[in-house]
Amino acid sequence: MIEIAPQVYLEDRFPGPRLGLVVLTRGLVLIDTPPCPDAAQTWQHAIRAMNGGFPDRVLVLLDHHPDRSLGAPVVDGTVMAHEATVDWFQSNPNYFRSQTDRRGHVWETCRTLQHPQWPHVHVAYTERASIYFGDTPVYLLHRPGPAPGATWVEVPHARVLFIGDAVVLREPPSLEEADLPVWLEQLARLKEAYRGWVVVGGRDGLLDLDRDVAEMEKRLRAWQEEMQTWARQKLTWSRVSRKVEAWLDLWQPRSERQAAMFRQRLLHGVAAYYRRHYVQPRRKSRRR
């Protein structure tokens, strides 16, 4: 783990999201988990080795994505998430059973993941929650856009902010549950309110607030404008998918396998977003 501020750590050794750890006077705040059970166990052992005997732990899930939530049962602690994340878990009990096509996510590559299931969330919050293990609080803030229950973790005494998938530049973001206009609003808030803070992206790690947020805004606006144009032209998904392929030039995969994952993730995410926002369902004609 890398200490990015006094008693605030970033873990980037495992496949999947970048993890966080905040050591407070009388407890620990953990941010996300690796999806693969063996990696989650390794992270659990590392935390036990350095926690100084703290009995109190809170594990915060920054949204519902399987990449960051499937390891939660392996990690000790009270699990917290936004109520929309809990609702998503409850509304998608057969997510893994019904999945036939790969979606390009990291959890699909886990060889030790035998029977994936959603974690049990012990505490849900609405707009804001505070965690006190001593005199210095850690705040959970509801910041939808990438996902309905997307959460930021604010560590004010260290001026560190964990923003989950609000900024994802090194790989395609997951767009299945996204709301691009709301997402852009959150990025504007990020630039205005957190100047001078250490900002941690859930996929990219440490971010440059000005450069990286501006690039993310640029991409989201371009994608939104293109999809709106396709919708006005009433393009079918088969035609849209061929145009989406051009977006893959934004990323530089390290291998053919990763290139295939990026393509699967992008096409699946855009298909879900485009159909949800721009394709009107056909009404069944009534029989006379």
Image (spheres, rainbow, N blue to C red):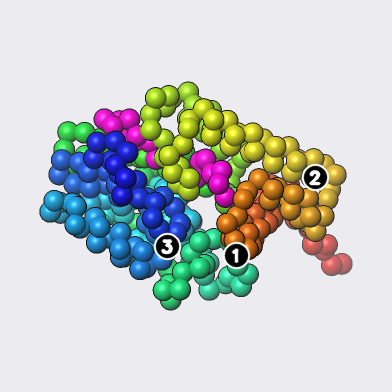
Please say whether residue 168 is one of the residues in the magenta stretch.
yes
The residue lying at 58 percent from left, 70 percent from top is: 99
Q: Secondary structure at mark 3?
A: loop
Mark 2 touching mark 1, by CB under 8 A?
no
Q: CA distance from mark 1 to mark 3?
A: 18 Å
Q: Is residue 280 visible?
A: no
Q: Secondary structure at mark 1?
A: helix
**Residue placed under numbered mark 1 in the picture:** 257
**Viewer-side residue, 17 vs 221:** 17
Name which quarter of the figure residue 100 lies in. bottom right
Residue 177 disc label? none
Image spot of residue 218 (x, y percent) = 64, 34
Q: Does 151 appear above or below 97?
A: above
Image spot of residue 262 (x, y percent) = 62, 57
Image spot of residue 288 (x, y percent) = 87, 67
The residue lying at 31 percent from left, 49 percent from top is: 1
**Residue placed under numbered mark 3 in the picture:** 35
Name which quarter of the figure residue 220 lies in. top right
Residue 230 disc label? 2
The amino acid beneath tag 3 is Pro
Residue stretch rendered in magenta on the structure: 154-171
The amino acid beneath tag 2 is Trp
Residue located farthest toward the front when viewing the structure as drawn: 254
The amino acid beneath tag 1 is Arg
Image spot of residue 268 (x, y percent) = 65, 58
